[in-house]
Image: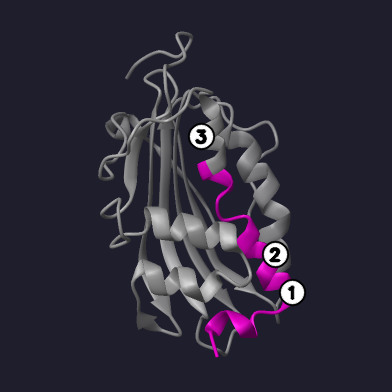
């Protein structure tokens, strides 16, 4: 039986939020995207000062004046028995809200979904998502997949979450390191660019 069959309803809801930043990146510029290329870090990476957030910690509602805004979220406690899954769900809207404001955005996050603190995680992975609205480009990478504590490929991880979130599974297949097609994440054109956004 797939690992995802053991996920309770609350953990299933958390996986629906996986592609939120990817969707925000795609909507940052409205033109149709061009053919993707292998993933690269953002061109503004050297200007990043990362803001780090612990488990279940939401950023302030007003966000930050940083541009680029670079954040690193711990999401390893998506756990049912201690309320970690609830704290994760409560923090996610604020994370999404601050992501839509800057011209240059880079998010790193570290996922782990488990039923109980004493159990091995059902699935784990790391994510990297960025966009540069001025240049009209972005990138997505999902990597370091593990299922029930064992290293796994993106296709295996996608299969493990497909029954609870087909959308999340599709993003894992498309942007997972070692996935078919993109060759380990993607850097892509969002079309056009925002002339009000400065270059770095």
Q: Position of residue 42 (x, y in %)?
A: 32, 35
Would residue 131 be found to the left or right of residue 74 on screen? left
Q: Position of residue 100 (x, y in %)?
A: 58, 31
Query: 113 above or below 174?
Result: below
The residue at which mark 3 appears reads as 26
Seen at 61% across and 72% down, the residue is 163
Seen at 37% across and 59% down, the residue is 176
Q: Classify the position of the C terminus by image quarter.
A: top left
Circle 2 Cα neighbour tier, 10 Å, few/some/many (<14 / 14–19 / ≥20):
some
* Label 1 close to label 2 by CB (< 8 Å): yes
Q: Earlier in the sequence, mark 2 or mark 3?
A: 2
Question: For the view shown, which residue lies furthest in the top direction?
Answer: 195
What range is drawn magenta here? 1-22
Seen at 73% across and 65% down, the residue is 86
Query: 153 above or below 131?
Result: below
Circle 3 Cα neighbour tier, 10 Å, few/some/many (<14 / 14–19 / ≥20):
many
| Res 9 label | 1
> In the image, is residue 6 part of the stretch drawn in magenta?
yes
Query: 11 above or below 6?
Result: above
Q: Earlier in the sequence, mark 1 or mark 3?
A: 1
Report how far apart the C-alphas of labels 2 and 3 lie in the structure: 22 Å
Would residue 25 be found to the left or right of residue 89 on screen? left
Total of numbered circles in the picture?
A: 3
The residue at which mark 2 appears reads as 13
Which colour assignment does the render follow?
A: one colour
Q: Position of residue 132 (x, y in %)?
A: 40, 27
Report how far apart the C-alphas of labels 1 and 2 lie in the structure: 6 Å
Would residue 24 be found to the left or right of residue 110 on screen? right
Report how far apart the C-alphas of labels 1 and 3 lie in the structure: 28 Å
């Amino acid at each position: 039986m797939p690992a995802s069959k053991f996920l309770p309803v609350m953990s299933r809801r958390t996986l629906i939020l996986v592609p939120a930043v990817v969707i925000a990146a795609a909507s940052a510029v409205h033109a149709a995207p061009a053919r993707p290329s292998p993933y690269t870090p953002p061109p503004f990476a050297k200007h990043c000062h990362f803001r780090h957030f612990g488990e279940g910690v939401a950023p302030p509602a007003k966000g930050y004046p940083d541009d680029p805004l670079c954040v690193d979220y711990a999401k390893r406690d998506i756990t049912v028995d201690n309320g970690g899954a609830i704290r994760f769900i409560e923090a996610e809207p604020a994370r999404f809200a601050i992501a839509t404001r800057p011209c240059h955005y880079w998010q790193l996050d570290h996922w782990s979904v488990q039923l109980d603190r004493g159990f091995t995680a059902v699935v784990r992975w790391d994510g990297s998502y960025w966009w540069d609205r001025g240049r009209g480009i972005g990138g997505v990478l999902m990597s370091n997949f593990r299922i029930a504590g064992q290293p796994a490929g993106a296709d295996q991880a996608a299969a493990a979450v497909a029954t609870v979130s087909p959308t999340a599974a599709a993003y894992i297949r498309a942007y997972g390191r070692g996935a078919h097609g993109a060759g380990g994440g993607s850097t892509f054109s969002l079309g056009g660019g925002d002339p009000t956004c400065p270059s770095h």
